[in-house]
Image: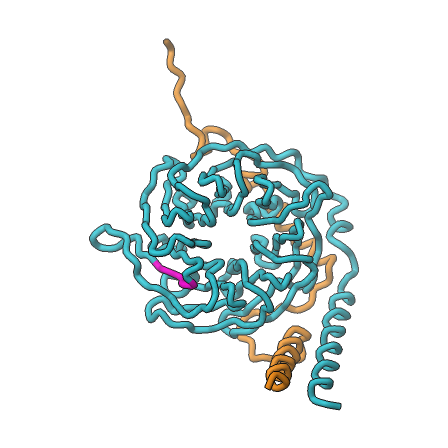
Chain colours: A orange, B cyan
Amino acid sequence: MSTTNNIAQARKLVEQLRIEAGIERIKVKTTVFCHVCVSKAAADLMSYCEQHARSDPLLVGVPTSENPFKDKKPCIIL
Amino acid sequence: MGEMEQLRKEADSLKDQITAARKAVQDSTLQEAAASITVVGRVQLKTRKTLRGHLAKIYAMHWSTDSKLCVSASQDGKLIVWDSITTNKVNAIPLKSSWVMTCAYAPSGNLVACGGLDNMCSIYNLKGKDGNVKVMRELAAHTGYLSCCRFLSDSEIITSSGDCTCVLWDIETGTQKTVFAGHQGDCMSLAVSPDFKFFISGACDFTAKLWDIREASCRQTFGGHESDINAIGFFPNGNAVITGSDDATCKLYDLRADQELITYQDSGIMCGVTSLAPSVSGRLLLAGYDDFNVNIWDALKAERVGVLAGHDNRVSCIGVSSDGMACCTGSWDSFLKIWN
């Protein structure tokens, strides 16, 4: 009984590996990820970071006047 | 040759093929590519708000898409919706089961969800007619604890479970639309791609899997970690995945190159990663650890550029708001802190 389970599991694994190896051509309606070389993948990540750096408040900081989380206490003259 | 032997051989051959295909595109490394850029300067974030109110460990938090409200879940048996700017509690929702492990805010802002050792995902309607927050649906079918949940919309939610599966639910009917099986260990965390077409899951089998939501298939599996993956997230452009593990490291895997590009580790860090969130540009990676701290990493250079020290117990959850203006941390010390 356990042998049939093992075979079923093994078959499932092979099926999955075929998908990941790109052999099983499933009818894909969504974008297919094609292998891109590491240099291009890295360049794209770097480029995205660069393009969005200026609009990343945690990276570039937020002036107090634009920081919704900072209490803008007016000065009181005693 | 018996069928078992044949299958084993085929599996090994396919694994070799996958490894070979990955090697074939390894014309460089992220370290080499990023050699020309300088590490970001020291990042010093300050606690701007402390959200007090929970009476026990906080296990999860999630920002609303409006970058103002957020929801937190604590084992005091409450879900609290906070206005992070005023620190007011907008809703304090008592839970049937106090053993909550995850919570989520729907993109619309209308619903929140939570679940845990009750093996269920409970959906709450925040915008009910009479103003009371009630359970709208109880999604029950998992045979293990609910570790994470994320809404696709007001009508669909994805859950990950200790039963090693992830499930796509139809909230209206309360039924399972798709079961994503394949992990060989408890699924601990999930994240949905920016375009809502894919999701990634991290599990106790030390792997992360990329799933095509509509095709109901696992497209890619990423290994390399030496222990449970507790946290997972997408790099903001949707082309890379970041994982955090009990092996004290975080890793970045590129989906199109189908491999790990870099590991975030330091000999001084020996405790597990509990949670992670990238900043909106992706340049900073904020990761919560068992040692009560959050380390801020330069994601491209894999160097630590900051620390958020302020909690008196484990940081269990972290999130960066959609507009990137603030980071929220939740801890076993029962407090949430807003930093920027």
Q: Which residue reaches farthest top? A: A78
Can residue B217 be found in the magenta stretch? no
Q: Vertical placement of B22 versus B240: above or below?
A: below
Q: Is residue B325 visible?
A: no
Identify the residue at horizontal 52%, vertical 68% (top origin). Answer: B165
| Of residues B91 and B185, the one drawn nearer to the viewer in this rendering | B185
**Image quadrant where residue B136 sits:** bottom left
Give percent across and percent down for residue B212: 54, 69
Q: Which residue reaches farthest front? A: A1
How would you classify the magenta stretch by its main secondary structure? strand
| Of residues A40 and B267, the one drawn nearer to the viewer in this rendering | B267
Identify the residue at horizontal 66%, vertical 54% (top origin). Answer: B251
Q: Vertical placement of B172 versus A49: above or below?
A: below
Give percent across and percent down for residue B335: 45, 39
Q: Is residue B115 visible?
A: yes
> In the picture, which quadrant includes the N terminus of chain B?
bottom right
| Of residues B117 and B212, the one drawn nearer to the viewer in this rendering | B117
Identify the residue at horizontal 37%, vertical 56% (top origin). Answer: B97
Give percent across and percent down for residue B121: 40, 61
Q: Which residue reaches farthest bottom? A: B1
Q: How many marks?
A: 0
Can residue B121 be found in the magenta stretch? yes
**Image quadrant where residue B20 sits:** bottom right
Q: Which residue reaches farthest left? A: B130
Left or right: residue B294 versus residue B176 is right
Left or right: residue B78 versus residue B40 is left
Q: Vertical placement of B186 versus B310: above or below?
A: below
Q: Which residues are magenta?
A: B119-123
